[in-house]
Image (spheres, rainbow, N blue to C red):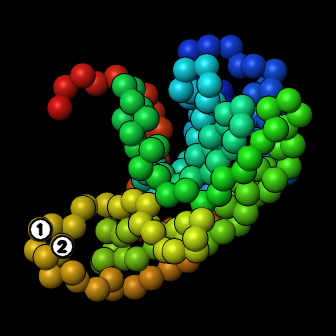
Amino acid sequence: MAWFARDRTGRPLTERERVFLAALVDLLSEVQPAQIDASETALTAERDSCLIMLIPHRTLGGIAIVVWLTDSEGAVALAQVGGLGMTHDSLDLGVWVSRTELDASRPNFAPLLERVREQLFASLTLRMYGSNRATVWVRDTRDVLRRVGILGTPLGWLDRLVRRAPTSEAQIRFVDSASSPVTEPSGVDEWFATSRGA
């Protein structure tokens, strides 16, 4: 399957969006990050004003590089993606790792693409609590380590109350050939399922 074949924008892309998307596909094709499956990448949008590109890690339970493109700005975040059928709340709760101003009349996408490239090679910190539970952390725009998401069984109330220390820690990247020590499927097939319950 091709890059970004999962198009949930509900609208045609603008010429500007097509140009940026083609450059992003070129970047991903050049780098060939081992932990990204082209068939899992997806597009969504917020009305006509914002294109959102989702680039999930194949084994980190929905942790994805999220690229936002508007007329005046491009931004990159890491988020644990889920439940996009009705809202983009899981994207809004992501950790912002860069923001780039764009000239609406003559955008230069190179700085935004460089921020995406940096995230492909940047380390994510995996704090493991045994063999089947971990938290995923990333450095934000101020270089502060922030939690992006949880893999495996969520911490119980006692673990949260006692604040148990992780049993081990690992650094992983989207370009690494080896899998993460704790894995969970991306869940991309469920991202856009519409749910009115809960």
Residue located at (67% from left, 33% from top): 70
The residue singled out by tag 2 in the image is: 160
The residue singled out by tag 1 in the image is: 157
Q: Residues within 10 Å of mark 2 (few under 14, many from 20)?
A: few
Residue located at (82% from left, 38% from top): 103
For this rendering, which residue is in front, 93 or 34? 93
For this rendering, which residue is in front, 168 or 157? 157
Q: Residues within 10 Å of mark 1 (few under 14, many from 20)?
A: few
Residue located at (35% from left, 61% from top): 150
Up the image or down, 196 lies above or below 37; here it is above
In-image side of 4 versus 58 (left or right): right
As drawn, which residue projects farthest toward the left? 158
* Quadrant in the rendering for residue 171: bottom right
Measured from the top left, where is residue 1 in percent x and y?
A: 68, 31
Up the image or down, 143 lies above or below 149; here it is below
In-image side of 142 versus 31 (left or right): left
Measured from the top left, where is residue 194 in percent x and y?
A: 34, 22
Up the image or down, 178 lies above or below 76; here it is below
Amino acid found under the numbered disc labelled 2 = Arg
Do the CB atoms of the residues marked 2 and 1 lie less than 8 Å apart?
Answer: yes
Q: The C terminus is located in which quarter?
A: top left
Residue located at (58% from left, 71% from top): 142
Whether residue 74 is visible here, answered yes or no, is: yes
Is disc 2 placed on a helix, strand or loop? Answer: helix
Number of marks: 2
Amino acid found under the numbered disc labelled 1 = Trp
Up the image or down, 37 lies above or below 13; here it is below
In-image side of 176 versus 134 (left or right): right
